[in-house]
Amino acid sequence: MAEYKFKLPVSEEDVRRLRVGDIVYVTGTMVTARDQAHRRVLELVKKGEKPPVDLRGLALYHCGPVVRKKPSGEWEIVAAGPTTSTRMEVLEAEFIEATGVRIIIGKGGMGSRTAEACRKHGAVYAVFTGGAAVLAANAIKRVKEVHWLDLGIPEAMWVLEVEDFGPLVVTIDSTGRNLYAELMAEAKKRLEEEIYPRIGLR
């Protein structure tokens, strides 16, 4: 296990150095996107149009932030905990290919399609601790832009300037290794080979 601090945008070469279990902190531009923002980006790409933010080399955060407006009119992020990433599994592989995003951040793991896209295109999936929404917000220095507020505040695309955002634990690396899948397989094996026989189940 190694620790890395990256300035965004990050290169494919740097991302391909990462391995499952590595700890990452990111500084620079991070963009939030949940289900609806993923779909809108992909719709634009299919029409030959560009999303409002060039995501190449950036970090994408599965997050619906809690925000407020300051008297100055600027947005402030109050809390920014991660959204469960499996919601985006059906969209993420295509999103990675279409946008060139390098680091996907969320919680709860992702599936085989995302793992294959990370392997093919040079990206990683990393988890941020659930329940640490205020810690996440403290690493967000300012809101640079916000797009698609018509989707609602949690589903809008927030473009954030972050400093040492983390710790992020890599759970899918660019070799396609998927820590959550490995843990699930090991748990299933133990159930079938050790636990079930002890309680009389086969």
Image: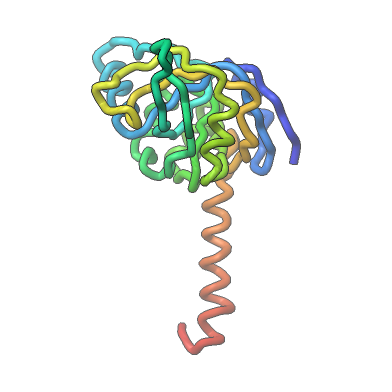
Q: Is residue 177 above or below residue 117?
A: below
Q: Can residue 98 be seen at all in this image of the molecule? A: no
- Viewport quadrant of the N terminus: top right
Q: Quadrant of residue 25?
A: top right
Q: Is residue 31 above or below residue 128?
A: above
Q: Can residue 36 be seen at all in this image of the molecule? A: yes
Q: Position of residue 87 (x, y in %)?
A: 36, 42
Residue projecting furthest to the bottom: 200
Q: Position of residue 9 (x, y in %)?
A: 58, 15
Q: Position of residue 118 (x, y in %)?
A: 52, 33
Residue projecting furthest to the right: 2
Q: Is residue 57 above or below residue 113?
A: above
Q: Nearer the viewer, residue 5 or 12?
A: 5
Q: Quadrant of residue 166?
A: top right
Q: Left or right of 69: which side holds 168? A: right
Q: Is residue 197 above or below residue 64?
A: below
The residue located at (49%, 48%) in the rendering is 108
Q: Quadrant of residue 162?
A: top right
Q: Position of residue 191 (x, y in %)?
A: 53, 73
Residue projecting furthest to the front: 71
The residue located at (29%, 30%) in the rendering is 36
Q: Nearer the viewer, residue 66 or 163?
A: 66
The residue located at (34%, 16%) in the rendering is 147
